[in-house]
Amino acid sequence: MSTAALALRQASLRRGRRLVLQDVTLQARPSRLLAIIGPNGAGKTSALSLLSGAASAEAGEVLLDGEPLTRIGAEALARRRAVVSQGARIAFPFRVHEAIALGRAPHRGRTTHHQDAALVEEAMARFELLHLAERSVPTLSGGEQQRVQLARAFVQLDRPVLDGTARWLLLDEPVTGLDPAHQVRALAEARRFADAGGGVIAVLHDLRLAARYADDVALIEGGRCTVLDTPAVVLTPERIRLAFGLDEASVGLFLTA
Amino acid sequence: MSASATGIGLRLADKRRRERRWLLAGAGILACIVALAGFGIGALAIPPVTVLHILAAQLGLADAAGIDPLHRQVFLAIRAPRVLLGFGVGASLALAGAAMQGVFRNPLADPGLIGVSAGAALAAACIIVIGPPAIIGASSVLRPWMLPLSAFGGGLLATAAVYLLARHEGRVVTSVMLLAGVALNALVGAAIGWLTFVATDEQLRSLTFWTLGSVGGASWASVLPTLTLALLAAIGLLRLAPALNLLALGEAEARSLGSDPARTARLVACFAAVAVAAAVASAGMVGFVGLVAPHLVRLLVGPDHRVVLPGAALAGGTLLVLADIVARTVVVPAELPLGVVTALVGVPFFFWLLLRSKRTGQGE
């Protein structure tokens, strides 16, 4: 199991003419929560879209447990990793429990509808959605819709570890739009997913939350991953001040003392 | 996992399944009742019992003795093809509408409104007035299929054009979609105006038919190809229901769930163009069925495409048979064009939807 990891190897990504990622090497491991931080437009979401397979690298490779992502079929990949992107909006008035059940699509024919319903219920309980189960998703607030997306991602993966392989949760700013209690709750669920053996990669803007919940922090600046280490090493006032262009007086606002 | 399997999750899922089954059963029964009415109502009224008797006799289940030969003949030669064609046309348009709404992620994507029917009609009108391309010889087996084939080509082109124009960064812009429809409809209006100018008297009569729609000329010869194409398209579209559900989450989300949104869009465009072509080639441009039918189903049992698609097909067929009954009875002995009746119902409905989508901010 030494190769169990989701990793970028000298990966580059071009959007239009702009090289948004250049020679990025980073690795996330099972049982750990990797936070990706960095200034706006630095390439955090681009890195996540390479890791999820939504975009393909112009150079370098993306490896899931040692295997190039491009060699894994779309449905098989969908059973091994789930993605929650920013500001996803559902197009029709699906009810909350129906929208979450869509996460079971890659498992069609592999599980009974009893098992699916049980997973949906568990995820609704996890993200405090049971009382909203019959509401139509577009009528919910932004934060509630975000929780529906998180619940959908959880049912998509079944379990943090399945058939001996870790599953991966890829979250792009998962707590944006959530109230403080739900921010803590969502990250605690991600933490539990990692503690149970799954891998989590989350783009985070809140450095204090990163310090509190992450095992590793990757700092992305100008399309490059400049450091990947423990929070204690990465989240130092000096490094954060330089990376985000803050002055000495304000950097303390964003870091745990 | 099994401890909670008896809980609310299962209850909700099962409740939804039951609702869907009831809706489809109800829609099926309603379709049969309306079809019986369609078979019976007209200059010569045929009682429902007689209709059932004739049907049973045709299937060899009952003795044909005792059936009025006039009833039998009117039923077999006029009413049956007319009702079946109406049902097939309505079901095709509704199914195409429901599937296109899924791909466009927008509840206003009706084949008539966004110009797909117009594209199909224009191509068919060109064949009527200008004639088929010279390479199709007079005796070619392709000749009887030229109208539906060209209607298919026109519909496919129009769908692709609107989709490519209106899609921006993975989502469809409602205003561009509707404006593209306005432009396509205007273009077709102008082209048909020009064709009217150069057409002979006989061609002129078929052109009027294209623009207003009718199932009045139904014969078995026109019904069978239409129903065959409609059935093919229906099978293709119904199989895409799970993919359309995932697409509702968003293009990126559908892809991350293992679906291929580009493939779904291509297949829907092709099958919807077949369905619209089948409808337009045999009944002309009949508007709004593709808008109204899917909405009725969504209002009743929600947006799951596994029930919206078959439900819309049943509802669309039923609505069109009803509209045809109205069209041929309100101004006896003349007939109203079918498109006039569906527009009278569809336009207020469209306004209501437009106002509602403005209020809820959906379909941005």
Image: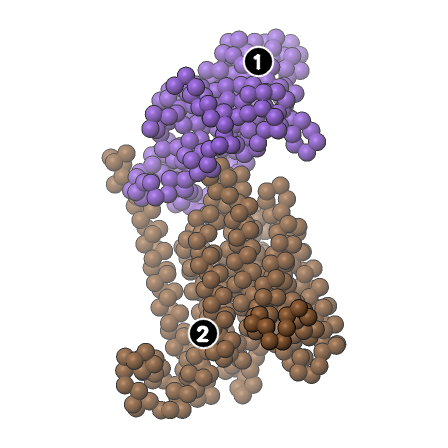
**How many discs mark residues in the rendered view?**
2
Look at chain B in the picture and name its colour.
brown
Look at chain A in the picture and name its colour.
purple
Q: Quadrant of the N terminus of chain B?
A: top left
* Kind of residue at disc 2: Leu
Question: In the displayed structure, would residue A181 be above or below residue B321?
Answer: above
- Residue A201 is marked as none
* Quarter-of-image position of residue B44: bottom left
Q: Nearer the viewer, residue B345 or A71?
A: A71
The disc numbered 2 marks a residue on which chain?
Answer: B
Q: Secondary structure under badge 1?
A: strand
**In the picture provided, is A72 more to the left or to the right than B214?**
left
Residue B295, horizontal then vertical, whole percent: 48, 58
Q: Which residue in the structure is indicated by mark 1?
A: A227
Residue B168, horizontal then vertical, whole percent: 64, 44
Q: Secondary structure under badge 2?
A: helix
- At 52% across and 12% down in the image, what residue appears? A229
Question: In the displayed structure, would residue A123 be above or below residue B101?
Answer: above
- At 70% across and 64% down in the image, what residue appears? B186
Q: Is residue B23 visible?
A: yes
- At 47% across and 56% down in the image, what residue appears? B237
Label 2 environment density (alpha carbons within 10 Å; few <14, some 14–19, many ≥20): many
The disc numbered 1 marks a residue on which chain?
Answer: A
Q: Which residue in the structure is indicated by mark 2?
A: B84
* Kind of residue at disc 1: Val
Q: Nearer the viewer, residue B41 or B89?
A: B89
Residue B358, horizontal then vertical, whole percent: 59, 51
* Quarter-of-image position of residue B274: bottom right
Q: Nearer the viewer, residue B251 or A85?
A: B251
Q: Is residue B212 visible?
A: no
Q: Nearer the viewer, residue B272 or B23?
A: B272
Mark 1 and mark 2 in contact (Cβ < 8 Å)?
no
